[in-house]
Image (tube, helix red, strand yellow):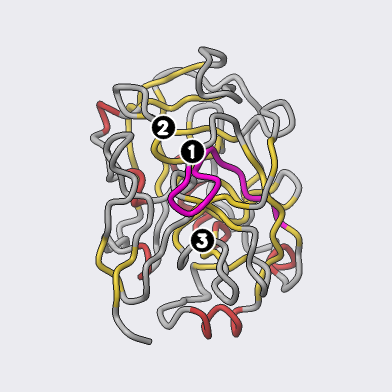
Amino acid sequence: MATAVMVPVVVTSASADDTAVSGPDKAAEPRIVGGGKASVSQYPYAVFLADRSGNQYCGAVIVSSTTIATAAHCAVAVKKNDVRVVAGREDKRTRDGVELRVSKVWVSPDYSGDPGKGDDIAVMTVSGQLPYRPAKVADNGNADLYEEGTKATVLGWGRVADGGARSDYLRSAVVPVVSDKTCRTAYSGYDPSDMVCAGYPEGGVDACQGDSGGPLMVGDTLIGIVSFGEGCAKAGKPGVYTRVSHFSNEISQQNGRKLIG
């Protein structure tokens, strides 16, 4: 596969969500396309990250009353003091829910700065409490949730078309988990130990720019974090997600809970 430019959602302002990051594969732009409007009452753990000016730039997911999980490339895109975690706000244009600052950021120490090389995960601790139900976090006992064909739901407020407008509302899309063999064919740098793919062979439904860091759910269990992909809902190019079960101990540790296993 020819070397080209990888474009996860690495942004610092409303106009910067097309920032490119060098990577091993072709242009990769996470985005939700082909889905529909969703409710925070149904998905109370879905949150978004905004900069100090209120511009939404990534997604995230509540994993405890004081912590959220997101993509590492989202965590390093904006300075900690400028990040705002917005929860309980279905429509970005409202003042619903809560808006909290971040007191601590943990980024996987193995994250290289390139989502295409894996370890694209971070946990942020908020200043205050998140009064919403957290997602369950997949661990090594949830291998069945990663089986090929498992229907999963991706959530976010990102763009609804390639280069199109951002959604004002939380949106969801259902995508099937893709086999490691298929994903390795699509992306030469795919690592099944800490990545998982989801999408339809024919494309048409996918995550979108602005959705990076958002959750991939099976029921109320978090199995993935939106990381990267090629193009927008392209055939043969499923979305690539951080495999959350690989990092369950680290997430638990950041949550202040006893380690698993």
Query: Magenta region: which residues?
Result: 152-164
Q: Are marks 1 and 2 in contact (CB under 8 Å)?
A: yes
Residue drawn at x 51%, y 16% is 98
Q: Nearer the viewer, residue 88 or 14?
A: 14
Q: Are marks 3 and 1 in contact (CB under 8 Å)?
A: no
Q: Nearer the viewer, residue 76 or 186?
A: 186
Classed neighbour count for the residue bearing mark 3: other residues with Cα under 10 Å, few (<14), some (14–19), many (≥20): many
Q: CA distance from mark 3 to mark 1?
A: 14 Å
Residue 33, horizontal then vertical, whole percent:
60, 52
**Helix, strand or loop for disc 3:** loop
Residue 257, horizontal then vertical, whole percent:
53, 39
Circle 3 residue: 232
The image quadrant of residue 244 is bottom right
Classed neighbour count for the residue bearing mark 1: other residues with Cα under 10 Å, few (<14), some (14–19), many (≥20): some
Amino acid type, mark 1: Arg
Q: Are marks 3 and 2 in contact (CB under 8 Å)?
A: no
Q: CA distance from mark 1 to mark 2?
A: 10 Å
Amino acid type, mark 3: Cys
Circle 1 residue: 166
The image quadrant of residue 70 is top left
Amino acid type, mark 2: Gln
Circle 2 residue: 56
Quadrant in which the C terminus is drawn: bottom right
Residue 69, horizontal then vertical, whole percent:
48, 43
Q: Residue pushed farthest top? A: 95
Classed neighbour count for the residue bearing mark 2: other residues with Cα under 10 Å, few (<14), some (14–19), many (≥20): many
